[in-house]
Image: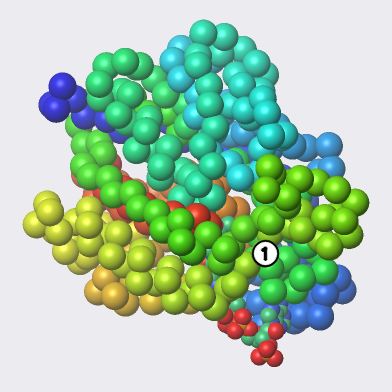
Amino acid sequence: MDDKKVGFIGLGKYLPENRLTNKELEKIVDTTDDWIVTRTGIKERRIARDDEATSDMAVRAAKNALQNANLEPKDIDLIIVATITPDMFFPATACIVQNKLGANHAPAFDISVACSGFLYGVAIASQFVKSGIYKHVLLIAAEKMSSVTDWKDRSTCVLMGDGAGAAILSEVKEGGILSVHLGADGSKGDLLCMPAGGSRIPASMTTVEARLHFLKMQGNELFKRAVKIMAEAAQKVTEPLGLKGSDISLVIPHQANKRILNAVAKRMGIDPEEKLYLNIEKYGNMSAASSAVALCEAVEEDRVKKGDLILLDAFGAGLTWGAVLIKW
Ligand code: ACO
């Protein structure tokens, strides 16, 4: 069982057409293009249509991944959707996706780990393939962050975007996932949360008026932790294999903030210009979808070559984090 190599046989993405630029945000909240670019690296983000839910974006990304893997929906044995913006509380968005795709015999479930969702999903999916239980697992990370964004809060609304990425994990002959590290710290959950709408504070007129159905974030506190935790997570998947940061061909991190990622690259001893993959400029922070879309685009842009050591590294609400080392 240990000899079975698990990797990515198809990747896909979907980004809504509608672009929201920093200049347009200047008309909505008290902010400037200069502040947003300097503090975050974001120039624009995509916003889904009103009639476009997370499952719609997920299905588009999944179809793209299936096509790239030369598979049909009926070939999929399991569907996992990583999202904190599901179509509704239940049924799971993965079940809605299963129906829309016609992947009739695949069990389906969601995972809710915010920005680390794609990496947690890779960890789960790869175990199902490695154990021989399933042959092809469809992992989708999809978010409609605009649906939980408070467009009156300049400290958060400039950061988020919508989109979806998908991957099919299966047995591969060469390369594959070499090492996985996951972590969580529930004691810091209040640093990034959506307070109402769950069983603790059910939805009411009062919660809507108090704007408690939008994400609340203590950006500064998260910033400090993100740098430390992402650098440590990278070490956890490299050091046991006798590898250093400099051995990594490309780091594809969760796209939360360019300054965070440059600081992580510095701690890892890598040149960000050469070895850090960034697309935050175009999409902002798409929570779980960020890592999935970034991996897909890095491959599309030929930044990933056969035999390369690729590091996925993510951090988000929970707190949760993860790192995945892949030989391509
Ligand atoms: N435009 C103009 N000014 C602003 C804006 C804005 N959009 N937002 C905040 N400011 C102001 C603040 O009010 C503050 O003003 P003050 O000094 O007069 O009080 C000033 O800018 C500095 O604010 P800070 O919050 O200290 O700015 P900082 O440099 O920390 O940047 C940011 C804020 C971008 C949010 C940063 O802290 C960050 O990226 N944090 C990490 C986010 C993260 O990693 N989240 C986890 C993953 S996301 C997930 O799981 C869904």
Visible residue check, residue 164: no
Residue furthest front in the image: 200
Residue 104 as seen in the image, left or right of residue 3: right
Residue 162 as seen in the image, left or right of residue 250: right
Mark 1 residue type:
Lys
Residue situated in front as seen by the camera: 305 or 241 = 241
In this rendering, is residue 323 above or below 133? below
Q: Position of residue 73 (x, y in %)?
A: 53, 15
Q: Residue at x 25, y 74 (%)?
A: 269
Q: Where is residue 277 in the image (x, y as percent from the top left)?
A: 42, 60
Residue situated in front as seen by the camera: 28 or 24 = 28
Which residue is identified by label 1? 216
Visible residue check, residue 304: yes
Quadrant occupied by the C terminus = top left
Q: Element type at marker 1?
A: strand
Residue 302 as seen in the image, left or right of residue 15: left
Residue situated in front as seen by the camera: 44 or 53 = 53
Instruction: Report which quarter residue 46 is drawn in.
Output: bottom right
Residue furthest left in the image: 242
Q: How crowded is mark 1: few (under 14 residues within 10 Å), some or many (20 or more)?
A: many
